[in-house]
Image (cartoon, rainbow, N blue to C red):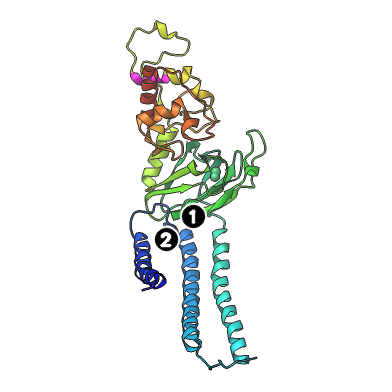
Amino acid sequence: MSFITRTLRRVAVMAPLTLLATVLAGCSGEYPQTTFQPVTEFGARINEVYSGIFMWTMLILTIVLVVLAYVLIRFRDRPGAEPRMTYGNNLAEIGWTLGPAIIVVLILVPTVRTIFYTYEPAPEDALVVEAVGHQWWWEFRYPELGVTTANELILPVDRPVEIRLSSADVIHNWWVPRLGGKRYNHPVAAMASGRPEATNYRRLSFTIEEPGEYLGQCAEFCGESHALMRMLVNAVEPREFDAWVDRMRSAASFTVPEGVPAPGVQPAAQTAQTSLEARGYQVFLQSGCAACHSIAGTPFMGRLGPDLTTIGDRWSIGAGTLDNTPENMARWIRNSPGIKPGSKMLTFPNISEEDMTALVAYLSSLK
Ligand code: CUA
């Protein structure tokens, strides 16, 4: 047996097996960012267009392969036999012009209809959320509710939502695949406070039909940590959403930990033992964290970095960079750019172990 024959045989055996393994691999595991299990009408419509186009391309592929196989066998090289030549067959020419034209129309009509559907304005009663892209995290503001959060977005199910997309720096792109759609966050819409209200947001409107956690991420290259600009949409029942909003709005939910001296009182004047959280609060204050971060119910009102009001509750640290554990939080505070390249957060290598434990305890308690 020649080398070529042996190789061909091996390929003939291995190729179908490899193909089978590849296809089966697609059935395993979980795909949190799949577009095939939409939970909004918006996503379902896009999925329908995709399935329709996929069906047509598979049909065309099948026809082409069948005709190709027929031609290869029927007109294979035979000594002395010349295939018959055909010129100017009107029927064939009309067929291969009209056929694809009809398919293009059948693809075009649902596509254009879906594009218009995805740009329909949100209903009047829609919940407005401003999603501001930052290098490399997401700021979520609920202007009507006076609530701000970061990286993890809480939304009610069964209520229309209007997401207003903007950016504080470069172009980002909102994409939560199971909610459908993908749309740019343009910097033009991000206006500094005091400037006229921006109206040139890009918008995205949908209604989530199923409670659950839906992962998403920035879909436009926006710098070195673009891949670490993730977000989690947490869709909850309307009751639960209202309770969350109440909690976020009531300053009493996020009071200063017990044991923190009143303003103007020197810590040395304290006699009582302070709790770990109270010490962490002081570390937060003294390390200057509040220059960039806000925490509701405290005097910390920095706006440069993510709001930390519910940091203890979030699924991750650094917009999907690390799991939210005390060890990771300490690592992150010490040297965030060492973990997430280009992170704008300052490094804090000199906080003592004890102070760091207290700081992490305080932040973790914010839920
Ligand atoms: Cu933001 Cu990529």
Q: Residue at x 48, y 80 (%)?
A: 63
Q: Residue at x 55, y 62 (%)?
A: 117
Residue 107: where, in percent of width, then height? 54, 72
Q: Quadrant of residue 109?
A: bottom right
Residue that lies at the very extreme toward the front in this rendered image:
2
Foreground disc of the pair 2, 1: 2
Which residue is tagged 1? 206
Q: Amino acid at mark 2?
A: Phe
* Label 1 beta carbon less than 8 Å to ligand 1: no
Which residue is tagged 2? 36
51 w.r.t. 319: above or below: below
Pick whichever of labels 2 and 1 is earlier in the sequence.
Answer: 2
Residue 185 seen by the camera: yes
Residue 319: where, in percent of width, then height? 46, 39
Residue 252 seen by the camera: no
Q: Quadrant of residue 188?
A: top right
Q: Dot 1 surroundings within 10 Å: few (below 14), some, or many (20 or more)?
A: many
**What segment is highlighted magenta in the picture?**
276-281
114 w.r.t. 355: above or below: below
Q: Regarding mark 1 in the picture, which secondary structure is present there?
A: strand
